[in-house]
């Protein structure tokens, strides 16, 4: 059977964003809570410093014909090969190519765009549609599956209004399911009759039926659904689909009629009936099935009450003790002198006037011409205070009422008489042994919190409840039913308690004490992490470790937990392109640890191997004083990789793979596949895009600072050309002498 060539659905205008009229936006801040109220998408043009590049980029978003848009995007790519915004330009080139009928070229441009920004569902849908039309079936299924995931995961892009997004999203989902159904039908028709063919046909019908339910007006979907039923030997259902399409009229009516005539001719009827009678007998009034939605009962399921972490210690004494020493438990604590790690006695002054810059592993303090003493951190009568010089010319003293953090840096907060908690703008770096303005290093100039003199206003920019509490405290809620405002917020306990990960425990405690233990699913509290899906595992960790997660209040003001359904909130994320480019390298990789979950979710280890945070980290901790990252195998880190990649348990095979001496740091899995390239506020942490492979071509294009190559983190004296030569020689499988390791990455 021949599948008819079908038109693609890749209109260029669908992604032409309406650039903001004003050009002052600096983009969504990093290390901040994003809600539907404060969502502040980046205006890309504002982040381009070169006026010529900026003008050429803006010109790409004018509504022009496909050929002109394609020519302009290609000219931009040739003129600005090191631009930080190539993902967007490659996308425009891809769509322009699709609309111009240059499908192979469009797929290549799309590949380069998605290499820089994979989480682009609208482009992935267009790509899947083209791949299916070109019989690139496996690729089409992968692209469409990714698109469906991202359509559910991310909120509406800035180019589509919130009001329009549900309809656009439903249409995009229909095309994605259509691409999957078409690809599987094409695969089925290449198979001989048998189990595999039937399995592919059933899958095709399922995907096409879903697409038809999502967009019943699309005649192409309806027609192919009829073709799939016919291929599966179900001529009765095929007749129903084709008859409904024929009676509807339109572009596909002649094709439906031809298919009906073929079915009619193939049937031997006694007594003979006319073709018209055959049509009239068809049950063509069948309505397409409706797309499924989550069960209302599941969504409204009331959860048990919360008991607090201390309720766990009697039965789980060792786990409780270990957890109590972790950074999660000590993330936010009421003031106790012994918990303070900052220098309040000797190096205890902070001066404004210097420019603090920290980017991609390098801290630079550029001395300013005017130094001005802003704060003194002191101890009086055994109590710690911040003394701040304010705009009235006087010194104002604030007690330290809370400590935030306990490992590499520590911030401090004070509680006002009205119950508000405000974070001091200066934090202490254990690694640098200095008091630093962290927000200035993270935000850059211009943000409210980067100017320490704004602290005296005691407004939302320094509010702990508004800016920090959602990830630093347990069971945060707004008692007034609002969102993340400074007033009305309360939390059950400081730090990250047991129930933030395991769920509300009162029901469990009551059942255990009464000896009445009812069966439950692994995701019901208390969660059995050994049995839940990797995605649910990650969703629980993402409550705090995902930068892009949108945070909005539940029906009773819940801000980081739920009282019905699942106990952890599963909100959508902000499209990653809306964040300031400071969060990314030009090669598309994440540059900030605030994107740690996003980084892991990009990796094949998660997407195919089902790796989670708990694969490598013990959330309850053990030996925390010497194992602050809570690794399961701190002294034998390769074990966290060779549990799956068992072939490298053989030391000879491992050395052959790494091309370095087996006992060297350079031969550790993480040295190449998890290099230290993510900024973590004055130190570099390992990327969690675990299958990261040193890419010399990207480094040659963007330079080591914007595309750090793991090889050059050790071999600092070498060039990207050298790294390219080494990697190419390894890939050729020619005998290679192990490279001598130098420093630890």
Image (spheres, rainbow, N blue to C red):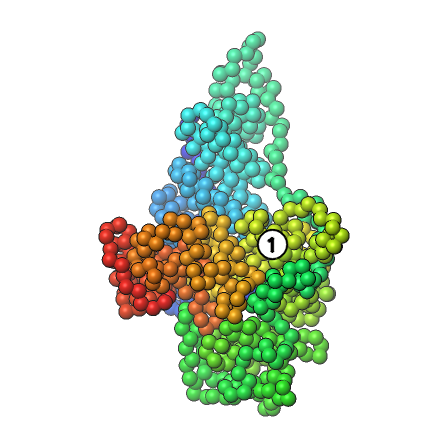
Given residues 512 and 166, the one toward you in this image is: 512
In this picture, is 42 found above or below 415? Answer: above
Q: Position of residue 475 (x, y in %)?
A: 67, 63
* Quadrant in which the C terminus is drawn: bottom left
Picture quarter containing residue 509? bottom right
Considering depth in this image, is 265 or 612 the residue closer to the camera?
612
Kindly identify which residue carries mark 1.
570
Q: Is residue 744 above or below residue 208?
A: below
Residue furthest to the right in view is 514
Residue 85 visible? The answer is no
Quarter of the picture holding the N terminus: top left
Within 10 Å of the Cα at label 1, are there few (<14), some (14-19), or many (20+) other Cα atoms? some
The residue positioned 49% from the left and 59% from the top of the image is: 632
- Point 60% across, 87% down: residue: 379
Residue at 40% x, 36% y is 135
- Where in the figure is residue 85, as x and y percent of width and height? 41, 60
- Disc tally is 1
Which residue appears farthest toward the bottom when viewing the image?
Answer: 393
């Amino acid at each position: 059977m021949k599948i008819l060539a079908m038109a693609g659905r890749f209109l260029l205008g669908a992604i032409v964003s309406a650039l903001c009229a004003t050009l002052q936006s600096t983009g969504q801040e990093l290390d901040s809570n994003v809600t539907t109220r404060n969502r502040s998408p980046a205006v890309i043009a504002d982040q381009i410093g070169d006026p010529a590049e900026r003008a050429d980029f803006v010109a790409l978003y004018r509504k022009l014909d496909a050929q002109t848009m394609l020519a302009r995007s290609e000219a931009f790519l040739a003129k600005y090969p090191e631009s930080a915004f190539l993902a967007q330009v490659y996308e425009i080139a891809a769509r322009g190519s699709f609309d111009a009928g240059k499908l192979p070229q469009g797929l290549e441009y799309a590949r380069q765009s998605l290499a820089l920004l994979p989480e682009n569902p609208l482009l992935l849908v267009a790509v899947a549609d083209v791949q299916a039309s070109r019989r690139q079936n496996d690729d089409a299924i992968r692209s469409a599956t990714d698109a469906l995931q991202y359509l559910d995961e991310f909120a509406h892009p800035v180019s589509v209004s919130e009001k329009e997004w549900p309809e656009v999203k439903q249409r995009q989902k229909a095309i994605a399911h259509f691409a999957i159904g078409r690809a599987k039908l094409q695969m089925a028709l290449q198979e001989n009759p048998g189990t595999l063919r039937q399995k592919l046909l059933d899958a095709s019908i399922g995907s096409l039926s879903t697409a038809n339910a999502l967009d019943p007006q699309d005649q192409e979907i309806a027609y192919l659904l009829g073709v799939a039923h016919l291929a599966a030997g179900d001529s009765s259902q095929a007749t129903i689909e084709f008859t409904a399409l024929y009676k509807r009229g339109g572009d596909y009516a002649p094709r439906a009629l031809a298919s009906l005539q073929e079915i009619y001719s193939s049937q031997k009827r006694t007594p003979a009936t006319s073709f018209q009678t055959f049509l009239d007998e068809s049950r063509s009034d069948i309505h397409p099935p409706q797309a499924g939605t989550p069960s209302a009962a599941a969504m409204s399921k009331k959860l048990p009450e919360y008991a607090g972490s201390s309720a766990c210690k009697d039965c789980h004494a060792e786990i409780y003790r270990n957890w109590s020493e972790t950074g999660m438990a000590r993330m936010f604590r009421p003031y106790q002198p012994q918990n303070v790690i900052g220098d309040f006695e000797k190096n205890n002054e902070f001066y404004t006037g210097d420019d603090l810059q920290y980017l991609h592993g390098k801290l630079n303090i550029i001395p300013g011409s005017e130094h001005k003493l802003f704060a003194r951190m002191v101890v009086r009568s055994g109590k710690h205070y911040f003394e701040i010089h304010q705009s009235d010319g006087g010194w104002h003293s604030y007690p330290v009422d809370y400590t935030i953090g306990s490992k590499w840096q520590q911030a401090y907060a004070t509680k006002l008489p009205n119950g508000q908690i405000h974070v001091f703008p200066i934090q202490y770096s254990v690694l640098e042994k200095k008091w630093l303005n962290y927000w200035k290093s993270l935000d850059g100039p211009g943000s409210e919190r980067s100017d320490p003199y704004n602290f005296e206003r005691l407004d939302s920019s320094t509010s702990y409840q508004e800016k920090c509490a959602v990830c630093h405290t347990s069971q945060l809620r707004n008692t007034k039913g609002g969102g993340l405002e400074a007033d009305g917020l309360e939390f059950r306990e400081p730090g990250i308690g047991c129930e933030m990960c395991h769920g509300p425990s009162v029901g469990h405690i009551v059942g255990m004490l009464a000896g009445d233990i009812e069966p439950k699913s692994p995701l019901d509290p208390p969660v059995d992490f050994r049995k839940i899906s990797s995605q649910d595992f990650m969703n629980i960790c993402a409550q705090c470790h995902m930068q892009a997660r949108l945070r909005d209040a539940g029906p009773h003001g819940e801000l980081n937990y739920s009282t019905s359904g699942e106990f952890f909130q599963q909100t959508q994320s902000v499209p990653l392109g809306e964040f300031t480019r400071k969060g990314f390298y030009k090669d598309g990789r994440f540059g900030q640890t605030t994107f740690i979950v996003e980084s892991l979710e990009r990796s094949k280890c998660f997407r195919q191997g089902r790796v989670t945070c708990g694969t490598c980290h013990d959330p309850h901790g053990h030996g925390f004083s010497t194992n602050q990252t809570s690794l399961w195998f701190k002294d034998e880190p390769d074990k966290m990789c060779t549990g799956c990649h068992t072939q490298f348990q053989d030391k000879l095979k491992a050395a052959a793979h790494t091309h370095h001496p087996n006992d060297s740091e350079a031969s550790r899995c993480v040295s190449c596949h998890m290099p230290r390239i993510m900024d973590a506020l004055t130190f570099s942490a390992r990327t969690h895009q675990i299958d990261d492979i040193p890419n010399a071509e990207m480094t040659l294009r963007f330079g080591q600072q914007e595309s750090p190559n793991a090889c050059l983190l050790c071999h600092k004296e070498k060039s990207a050309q050298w790294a390219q030569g080494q990697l190419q020689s390894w890939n050729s499988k020619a005998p290679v002498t192990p490279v001598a390791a130098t420093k630890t990455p």
